[in-house]
Image (cartoon, rainbow, N blue to C red):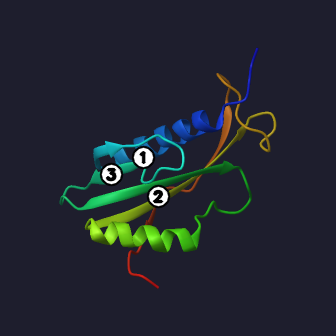
Amino acid sequence: MNRALTVQEQHNLAMNIVGKDLEKRGFEFLAVNSLLKRNPQFVCIDKNNQRYFVIIKVAQITEKPITYNVIWMETFKQHAIKNNAKILFAGVGLGSKKDGSKPPILNDEYLLQYDGIEYLDTALN
């Protein structure tokens, strides 16, 4: 019997998608956190040893870009500044191939909404 992916499974799938993108861009992983509601998901460095905190948000597929909570992000920016890190954000939309408004099905094709990785300026507003 096929079942919908759990929220944790969708989160893990999104992390795999973003992780592969980061690898292609030459980032090296220092830490990985796959727990829900624990940020950042990845701590990476680039070729210049600049530290990055990577935040991933999973959502249903929409016609609009997947965004982050601006107020929460201002607090997180303070954490990044204290740790001499920059912030990368990736919104990942997932949906069932048969009905994009429903979660993906285990071991089945799925729809993906991924616009890539967005650099967020850590300067506070």
Drawn side of residue 20 relative to residue 46, left or right: right
Q: Quick check: marks 1 and 2 in contact, CB under 8 Å?
A: yes
Residue 52, x across and y down, in percent: 32, 59
Drawn side of residue 91 relative to residue 47, left or right: right
Q: What SS does tag 2 mark?
A: loop
**Amino acid type, mark 3:** Val
Q: Name above or below for residue 120 compared with residue 19.
A: below
Residue 59, x across and y down, in percent: 66, 50
Camera-side residue of 75 and 112: 75
Residue plotted at (81% across, 38% down): 99
Drawn side of residue 115 relative to residue 29, left or right: right
Residue extending farthest to the top is 1
**Residue located beneath label 1 in the image:** 21
Residue plotted at (31% across, 44% down): 31
Residue extending farthest to the left is 48
**Residue located beneath label 3 in the image:** 43
Drawn side of residue 41 relative to residue 47, left or right: right
Q: What SS does tag 3 mark?
A: strand
Which label is found at residue 119? none
Q: Quick check: marks 1 and 3 in contact, CB under 8 Å?
A: no
Camera-side residue of 72 and 95: 72
Q: What SS does tag 1 mark?
A: helix
Q: Earlier in the sequence, mark 1 or mark 3?
A: 1
Which label is found at residue 117? 2
Residue plotted at (41% across, 41% down): 20
Residue 72, x across and y down, in percent: 53, 68
